Image: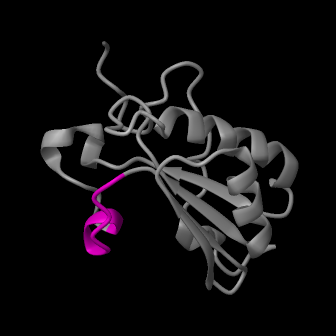
């Protein structure tokens, strides 16, 4: 397996859910932040949930920012969790947090979740 890039471990095709960060998005639009690491995922469901996020961005991207954040510093397991996950003690993956425009968390999902659950969560932030 090739070494993942620093931006995303989703190799083919790479996802483009990294173009906006949470600080830029809050107050402008509702936000869904997905913490997942497709190539390094212990649960093996990160790749599919990133795929679902890309599908839902097609449906809701004009009204909500969808952001994918990798789990490990520089996408290297031995470097530990990225600060947002470490600060909140999120030691598993994937996680989805949906926030309304004011930054209030309206929904969160952990682990294996599908299209319907993610769409339902996203709608809570709109």
- Residue closer to the observer: 36 or 120: 120
Quarter of the image that includes the C terminus: bottom right
Residue 116 image point, x, y percent: 75, 50
Can the viewer see residue 29? no
Question: In the picture, residue 96 is in which quadrant?
Answer: bottom right
Can the viewer see residue 24? yes
At horizontal 73% and vertical 72% (from top left) the residue drawn is: 30
At horizontal 25% and vertical 66% (from top left) the residue drawn is: 86
Question: In the picture, residue 104 is in which quadrant?
Answer: bottom right
Quarter of the image that includes the N terminus: top left
Residue 71 image point, x, y percent: 35, 49
In the image, taking residue 60 as reference, residue 121 lies left or right, namely: left
Coloring scheme used:
one colour
- Residue closer to the observer: 11 or 105: 105
**Most distant residue in the top direction:** 1
In the image, residue 53 sits, relative to residue 107, either above or below, namely: above
Residue 92 image point, x, y percent: 33, 54
In the image, residue 33 sits, relative to residue 38, either above or below, namely: below
At horizontal 56% and vertical 27% (from top left) the residue drawn is: 14
Task: Count the numbered circles shown.
Answer: 0
| Magenta region includes residue 14 | no
Part of the protein shown in magenta = 84-92
Question: In the picture, residue 48 is in which quadrant?
Answer: top right
Residue 60 image point, x, y percent: 83, 55
- Residue closer to the observer: 102 or 98: 98
- Residue closer to the observer: 82 or 40: 40
In the image, taking residue 7 as reference, residue 19 lies left or right, namely: right
In the image, residue 54 sits, relative to residue 106, either above or below, namely: above
At horizontal 86% and vertical 48% (from top left) the residue drawn is: 59
| Magenta region includes residue 91 | yes
């Amino acid at each position: 397996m090739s070494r993942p890039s620093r931006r995303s471990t989703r190799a083919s095709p790479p996802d483009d859910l990294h173009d906006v960060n949470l600080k830029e998005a809050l107050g402008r639009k509702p936000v869904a932040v997905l913490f997942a690491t497709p190539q390094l995922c212990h649960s093996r469901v990160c790749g599919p949930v990133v795929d679902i996020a890309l599908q839902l961005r097609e449906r809701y991207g004009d009204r909500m920012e969808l952001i994918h954040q990798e789990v490990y510093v520089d996408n290297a397991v031995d470097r530990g969790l990225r600060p947002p996950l470490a600060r909140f003690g999120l030691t598993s993956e994937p996680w989805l947090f949906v926030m309304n425009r004011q930054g209030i968390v309206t929904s969160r999902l952990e682990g294996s979740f599908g299209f319907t659950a993610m769409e339902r969560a996203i709608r809570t932030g709109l």
